[in-house]
Amino acid sequence: METVLIMSGLMVAILLITANYLVKGIGGMSAPLQQIGLFLLNKAPAGIIDLFSDEAGSGSKTWIRFGMFWFLLASIGAFLGLWHSYDGTALDSLASIGWSYDDGSMLTEYTNVFFFTALNYMLVGGALVAVARTANGRLASEKSASMVALLLTASTAAYLVLPALLRLSHSTMKQASSKASPTFPPLSWVPCSMQQF
């Protein structure tokens, strides 16, 4: 418990010192550091950042739109889970297109990930709206906020899709290797004269 209290006090002290320096600046270096920060936000990720709009409010709109996309996926997953719990054989017809349904634990995990990702996106979008309203109606870089939302969406989607794709490619490779390698009959089928060697 003592460690927790010490670390909590240290964290609060660091936050207070950081907030003080953010408000007052660091002596004569406050203006140059502000310019370096704006450069890193607006120009450093060259190329990709130019794909996004720099209009006021576009960063928070992007976060909220992606949040609605994740809510849509969560609602689809919840519908499939409820449908399967109502009728366990309802989704067996999808086996004709190669999809088989297990006990539903993976769908529950995916639905939870979709829902909590959507909730986080909506909270970040709402926080960006609040920050923009306190900072004269816009963020320091609307483009950067939109880019981070897109990169986080891509990484979350990769986290969800890559295990399934890797498992699919692994099973496909296993099937291909089993077809390519010849299968030998068991030893009992070999004539007796060959078994002696």
Image (cartoon, helix red, strand yellow):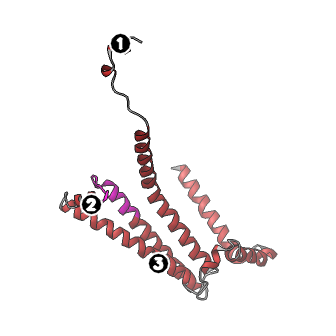
Q: Are marks 2 and 1 in contact (CB under 8 Å)?
A: no
For this rendering, which residue is in front, 28 or 63? Answer: 63
Give whichever of 125, 84 is nearer the camera: 84
Where 60 sits versus 166, above or below?
below
- How far is disc 2 from disc 3 in space, using C-alphas? 33 Å
Verify whether residue 111 appears in magenta.
Answer: yes
Q: Earlier in the sequence, mark 3 or mark 1?
A: 3
x then y, percent, for residue 148? 57, 71
Image quadrant where one finds the C terminus: top left
Which residue is tagged 3? 64
Q: Residues within 10 Å of mark 1 (few under 14, many from 20)?
A: few
In the rendered structure, the answer to whether residue 96 lies left or right of residue 70 reads: left
Circle 3 packing at 10 Å, graded few (<14), some (14-19), many (20+), is: many
> What residue type is disc 1 on?
Ser
Callout 1: helix, strand or loop? Answer: helix
Looking at this view, name the residue that lies furthest to the right.
28
Residue ID for mark 2: 94
Q: Residue at x 19, y 57 (%)?
A: 89
Q: Is residue 34 left or right of residue 158?
A: right
Q: Residue at x 55, y 80 (%)?
A: 59
Location of residue 193 with respect to 97 vertically, above or below: above
Q: State the CA–CA distance, disc 2 to disc 1.
A: 52 Å
| Magenta-tinted stretch | 97-113
Are the residues at dot 2 and dot 3 in contact (C-beta closer than 8 Å)? no
Q: Quadrant of residue 108?
A: bottom left
Q: Which residue is mark 1?
A: 193
Q: Secondary structure beneath disc 3?
A: helix
Q: Name the foreground residue: 87 vs 22.
A: 87
SS of the residue at dot 2?
helix
